[in-house]
Amino acid sequence: MTSLRSRGGRLWRAVAATATAAVLLTACDPKPPEASQGNAADAQQGECAAAADKPVSLVVGGRMGSQRPTIPKEVKDLLSGAVVNQQAIQVFRVDGEPSRVVKVSPAIDGKNDTRRKQQIEAAVQQVTTAVAGVVPKKPEADDLSALSQAAKLTGEGGTVVMMDSGLSTAGAVSFLNDGMFDADPGEVANFLAGKQLLPELKDKTVLLVGTGLTAEPQAALDDNLQKRVTALWKAIVDKAGAKCSTPVEVPSKREEVKADQPVSQVKLPAPVTFQPCGTTVLRDSGPVGFRPNEAKLRDEKAAQSTLQALVSQLTGGSQKVNLVGNTATYGSPEDSVTLSKQRAETVKALLVQAGIAADRISTVGDGQTGKYHEPDIGPGGTLDPAKAARNRSVVVELTCAR
């Protein structure tokens, strides 16, 4: 902690110590290992601390479709520590062309404790007012560019706080791209790294405030989708070299943000509906999804619940079912065929367990090829995360008598 020299230094040190103690209670996860096929790998739990005597930058999404930004206590304590230690505080807006809103350079030079306390409170209030007044200047929302600006302009050892839903509609990470919800977080981070599009976050701490929380007119995200959006941004900032990163939970408030600049609504993944005749794709990111590189379901109960509609449709009839397993272009072709076949067999086992005769169900492992595979390798041999996600599936083919 930087010590400040003055006759009234006791007040400054007391406020700084309080802010630091509060921030130290904020747990950060260490950087996780690279994500494997289908899902981000689980990170081991650990602790690190945002420094209360370093610069702070707030990336604020005061825009349509994102929850109105509010500063949680953890961040207010961090701001107080930065002010006491006369560290720069900046606010950046999230819109289609992100920019800096304000830079506060605190000068605490009062002649007595009362005056210095007033200066501290005034500086924090200036930041709070700036956050409340953030409005977009350009259509859409580009969180990655906003993070990149904040990272570049935040001093060494500082903290970047992202206060937005994370549902970008512009830039290199756009949820208007089909499959972004399904994309493996680690693969997205690797893709951005390969394109040299990651923010410069080395030795900085990143707090993700309210990630996945939307407001009107954007549809609400369920718990699964909120976790996926959070995992995506965490993987990006960790890959970008952040010292640590952690989500900060805030209450969900669906109050619409009024703004002149439009933001496209992100289409959420549709619930699984089995076609009476034809094909239904069971994406790996959905309820019938698997652990990375395994044929074991992430949530067997959720898979059973989803497949019950298919079971009901098949019960009492003789309709044939073919289950086609597919993978992204990842690993060896031989291993992909084996894994895709095993995953199709796992789905078959659940249907048989529910009462469908095994001889009515056939399985195929198409691996990295087959009629449902779309090219997912881009220029330079880079795996496209969104297309790769769409390739990870078990397709249900229902044959109807003619």
Image (cartoon, rainbow, N blue to C red):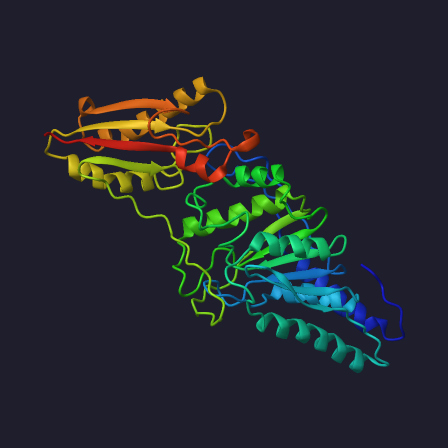
Furthest residue in direction top, as rendered: 334
The front one of 112 and 367 is 367
In the rendered image, the vertical position of residue 108 relative to residue 142, given as above or below: below
| Callout count | 0
Where is the C terminus found, in terms of image quarters?
A: top left
Where is the N terminus found, in terms of image quarters?
A: bottom right
Q: Position of residue 4 (x, y in %)?
A: 86, 67
Furthest residue in direction front, as rendered: 379
The front one of 331 and 370 is 370
Q: Position of residue 316 (x, y in %)?
A: 10, 34
The front one of 210 and 81 is 210
In the image: residue 276, left or right of residue 218: left
In the rendered image, the vertical position of residue 384 relative to residue 122, given as above or below: above
Quadrant housing residue 46: top right
Taking the spot 51% from the left edge, 50% from the top edge, the residue there is 230
Q: Position of residue 216 (x, y in %)?
A: 41, 66
Q: Is residue 382 visible?
A: no
Taking the spot 54% from the left edge, 60% from the top edge, the residue there is 164
Q: Position of residue 302 (x, y in %)?
A: 33, 42
The front one of 311 and 144 is 144
Taking the spot 57% from the left edge, 30% from the top edge, the residue there is 380
Quadrant housing residue 20: bottom right
Quadrant housing residue 366: top left
Q: Is residue 392 visible?
A: yes
